[in-house]
Image (cartoon, coloured by chain):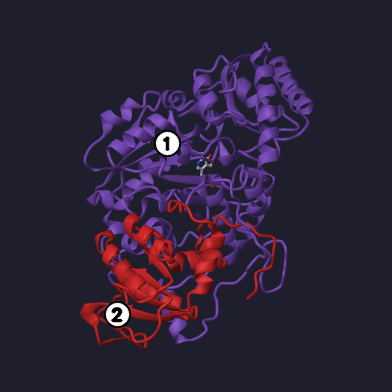
Chain colours: A purple, B red
Amino acid sequence: MTTDRPTGFGFETRSVHAGASPDPTTGARNTPIFQTTSYVFNDVDHAASLFNLQTFGYIYSRLTNPTTAVLEERLAALEGGRGATCAASGHAAQILAFFPFMEPGDGFLSSRKLYGGSITQFNHTFKKFGWNVTFVDSDDPENFRKAMTPKVKAIFCESLANPGGVITDLEAVAKIAHEHKVPLIVDNTMASPYLCRPFEWGAALIVHSTTKFLSGHGTSMGGAVIDSGAFDWAQSPKFAGLTEPSPAYHGLRFHETFGDMAFTVHGHAIGLRDLGPTMAPMNAFLTLTGIETLALRMERHCANAQVVAEWLEKHPDVSWVSYAGLPSSPYHVLAKKYLPRGKGSVFTFGVKGGYEMGVKVVETVELFSHLANIGDTRSLIIHPASTTHRQLTDEQRTAAGAGPDVVRVSIGIETVDDIIADLDQALRSATRRNA
Amino acid sequence: MNHDRYDDAYLRSILDQAKTIAMVGASTSWNRPSYFAFKYLKGKGYRMIGVNPGAAGEALLGETVYASLKDIPVPVDMVDIFRKSEAAGAITDEAIAIGATIVWMQIGVRDDDAAARAEAAGLKVVMNRCPKIEYGRLHGELGWGGFNSGIISSRRRRI
Ligand SMILES: Cc1ncc(COP(=O)(O)O)c(C=O)c1O
């Protein structure tokens, strides 16, 4: 069945069904976990066709796996993309996103308002590959234009940035990327496709840490890079990895042969084949199960976060709250445009009393879990200055939005009164002990 | 008819109706896109015949390659045009002349005037699509590579 509506099936329908028809062999209704490394060839000619990429099919699970393929199709369907390549983690997906076209000595621009782990990955590990990042302040999209050089091959940003409720003006940044004929890569982890669909604003590629809201239950590491299919890799000689003969495939030209499917074919046939960060089928299965309820969970995550943020803003022990759903947020206007259905559930607030108070709050919570993750059904809390950002100087911490008084929360789907009661008791007893 | 978007039922009926496909611009080099599509469709049971003046008389996966559509000695159902758009008009007219019932132009190939002539002569037309990709998409194979098929079905596919 396909729908006659030009936009296709609704988001919730795609979340439950896309990619997952009953298993043709057994009739199994849920997606089987294909816990296998390899797949039998019909004959030598079939094997040759598969190795030459002349036919669809499975060879070896480092490249493709039937369970993971269902997740890939589902993610592509939810983002409105052409195809997807899953990876072992969000960070692995970020490598796969750049790998097809970056060469040693090439550069890319990135918003400096990013998940700290991504800043480190770009700043240190990517430099070992000769991929040079230039960070710019994304609050003024023109900064991307100013930083553009002939060596720049892509622009990277987060739609809703971790941790501080920062929103990127995707349409403005995409316009600059288009003018310079480079792809805009958007990390859509914090928003999830339920809240924001970056392809509709002109992004070329989307990356996800599926570890977070997509899998949604804190069970499974995973990542994905999704291709819009809309970026013309042949429009500039910069993307030779996709347009020129590939020595790893006997001179095959990916873009000429696979058209708008080239990026995703390359992602599996070269990216996963040669770098090897494959998602485990079990993780793909758990992530698929999580995605079935993505819309319901995001609604509740956002509704709870809004109530908690409003409550915190009035709390006597709290000095500020950075949540795009609050009129006090400088990102409130952008949030209305890009996140009409909810402003996410991860945000930061400042405790009066600085470092000491921050530490006490995270040590006093009973319902919140003190850990380094986001996007779980459970409410999560962390004091970045004493944990994730501990290695930095005071100055660097403040610049990264991880000053001494900053507490980051990821609001879960528990009863909102219980979430508030736990924060209240933690703030009150921390103040008492501090006094 | 609208050639910006095709119903799945339309594409499915075409792929069911065609038995013999002549591919104009088929290459005998294994790493050319046309060879990929040729080999895949042959594997799905279509009788595939190559048309390519540069390779006329050679064998392509067991079938003789012809210099032009008119030289093919057997009836052809579908003409698959693996040439640039500028060449599509003349090939379409030949397809009409040899009694083909379908003209299919590959991704990137489109000639609306030629399509109108073919439709006026009673042929079905598909433009700017690849029959290999559409076959794979409609038969549940495209998703194996992580692609969005746009198809949702709670029915068990026959194998
Ligand atoms: C916005 C964002 N991007 C990427 C990542 C990295 O993902 P992973 O931990 O799955 O490698 C994270 C993880 O915290 C994240 O929050």
How many marks on residues?
2
Give the Cα separation between the discs numbered 2 and 1.
Answer: 56 Å
* Label 2 with label 1: CB-CB less than 8 Å: no
Secondary structure beneath label 1: strand
Work out whether residue A45 or residue A275 is closer to the camera in this orientation and state it: A45
Instruction: Provide residue A405's location: percent of width, then percent of height.
Output: 56, 20
User: Can you identify the residue that label 1 sits on?
Assistant: A157
Instruction: Provide residue A206's location: percent of width, then percent of height.
Output: 46, 45
Q: Which mark is residue A71?
A: none
Q: Quadrant of the N terminus of chain A?
A: bottom right
Q: Quadrant of the C terminus of chain A?
A: top right
Instruction: Provide residue A147's location: percent of width, then percent of height.
Output: 27, 31
Work out whether residue A385 or residue A175 is closer to the camera in this orientation and state it: A175
Rendered residue at 54%/18% (across/down): A329
Q: Are marks 2 and 1 on the same chain?
A: no
Three-letter amino acid code of the residue under disc 1 = Cys
Judge whether residue B59 can be spotted in this image. Answer: yes
The answer to whether residue B56 is left or right of residue A336 is: left
Work out whether residue A224 or residue B60 is closer to the camera in this orientation and state it: B60
The residue mark sitting in front, 2 or 1, is: 2
Chain at tag 1: A
User: Can you identify the residue that label 2 sits on?
Assistant: B70
Secondary structure beneath label 2: helix
Instruction: Provide residue A63's location: percent of width, then percent of height.
Output: 48, 66
The answer to whether residue A226 is left or right of residue A8 is: left
- Above or below, A82 against A386 in this view is below
Rendered residue at 63%/44% (across/down): A10
